[in-house]
Amino acid sequence: MTTTQMTTRCRDAAPPPMTTASAGRRHRATSLSPPSSRPPRWGASWLLALSLGWVAAACSDDAANDGGGQGAGTDAVDTADAPDNADAASAHPSLAWALQTAGPHGVGYRKLEVSYEAGGGLGTRKIPLHLFYPTAATQGSHPPPHGGLVVDNTSWVDAPATPPDDGVEWPVMVYSHGHQGFAGSSAFLAWHFASHGWIVAAPDHVGNLLSDAILPRPTWMYYARNLDVGASLDRVAKLGAADGFGGGKADTSRVVLTGHSFGAHTCWAAAGASFDIKLMEADCKEDGARVRQGDCSPAMMALMAAGLRDERIVAAIPLAGTMHRGVMGDKGHETAKIPVLSITGTNDDVGGKAQFDSCVGCDLTWIDLLDGTHQSFAVTCSQPGSKDKTCPDIKRYTLAMARRHVLGDQSVKGLLAGEGKSDVVVKFEQRKP
């Protein structure tokens, strides 16, 4: 079996000139130097290729069961229709850089440990938190391969962060990895966002990693992931000089959440999609498709019945995954509160069409990319010189969605409405509430 077959089974032009933003209460113009020419330096890619089959097999559970153009980033920004609560009196300096092109910053990397008291009977939970962020560093050491698979010669370990582009706050993206995945599985997105001035927070969902997965999957994993995201945001909000972040502040009041594969479930739960408790309890008695027999304590059920909506998350981007109907039922989407952008690949049938057809009342955009595989959204596009033609569109649409809903970028509205599609985009469908 070839590497391509295995991954299928599992499911920069120079930047434009910087525009000068007029002063506003929250944003101010910042002079940025042009991006340096820093081609990624990679280690032996044979390790990655050799391991792809293992990753594909490890995440096949999600692949089998999840389902039931060019950007306009350099156009003038009209902020009259900015999102509610977004102070966009002036254009954010980060909006001057083309969506698919690396931004002006280098990428820093730092690993922290987060300890918090988890509900549902879990007690104290400790998770590693991986941060990617903008830096001016050009030398130092690189992280060890993420998950033992993704070689990272792009990030600089513990490098000091550059000040926020607006001089005040860094925007924040959170990433939730897939079943038996790891925080750096979609490192190419973390590098891209960090180069554009974002802090990317990627927790390791302990108990569901490639290195420590509990199998079969315990019921508590359906809510622990969202608790991990919430605790990670709490920690990011406290970043300061002691963490190498100087006097800037991470803006955790408006955050975008992305998730690969099982991370799609994390996205929908954070968006406010509800659990079907009766369905889960019935499965618990009979060892159903999603819930282990007898693994449904009252504390777990009460926590999930209350919902996992996180008000700080204003948009969600599930990648290569769909809502878990086995725990959220046929109508779980009806309580989702925020815009969702679902991106899938034609060579990875995770149920994107079924999700779109059934999601009546959702604020949902579904994009299907030609020849995209499950790992296009993770390990494949994080490889050196990847030839996967979906990579530019994954970066383009993900950053566009984030800029639109976190930074109030009006210039991407056309792209997010289906204009300017590349030939790789074979399906672009939208639903509105």
Image (cartoon, rainbow, N blue to C red):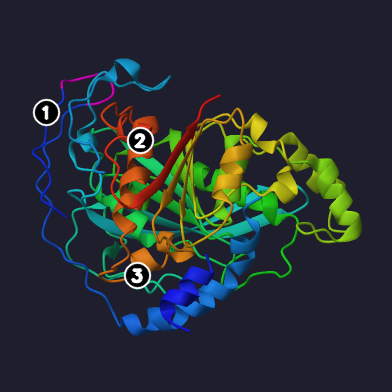
Three-letter code, disc 3: Pro
Residue at far right of view = 285
Q: Is residue 341 above or below residue 37?
A: above
Q: Label 3 vs label 2: CA separation? A: 38 Å
Q: Is residue 359 visible?
A: yes
Q: Which residues lie in the magenta part?
A: 22-27
In this figure, which residue is indicated by the disc labeled 1? 20
Q: Main secondary structure of the magenta part?
A: loop
In this figure, which residue is indicated by the disc labeled 2? 418
Instruction: Tell me the quarter of the image containing the C terminus.
Output: top right
Mark linked to residue 95: none
Disc 1 element = loop
Mark 2 and mark 3 in contact (Cβ < 8 Å)? Answer: no
Residue at position x 10%, y 50% from top? Answer: 14
Q: Nearer the viewer, mark 1 or mark 3?
A: 1
Query: Earlier along the polypeptide chain: callout 1 or callout 3?
Result: 1
In this figure, which residue is indicated by the disc labeled 3? 143
Three-letter code, disc 2: Gly
Q: Quadrant of residue 146?
A: bottom left
Residue at position x 32%, y 61% from top? Answer: 158
Q: Nearer the viewer, mark 3 or mark 2?
A: 2
Disc 2 element = loop
Number of numbered discs:
3
Q: Label 1 vs label 3: CA separation? A: 35 Å
Q: Is residue 222 above or below residue 181?
A: above
Residue 25 included in the magenta stretch of the image = yes
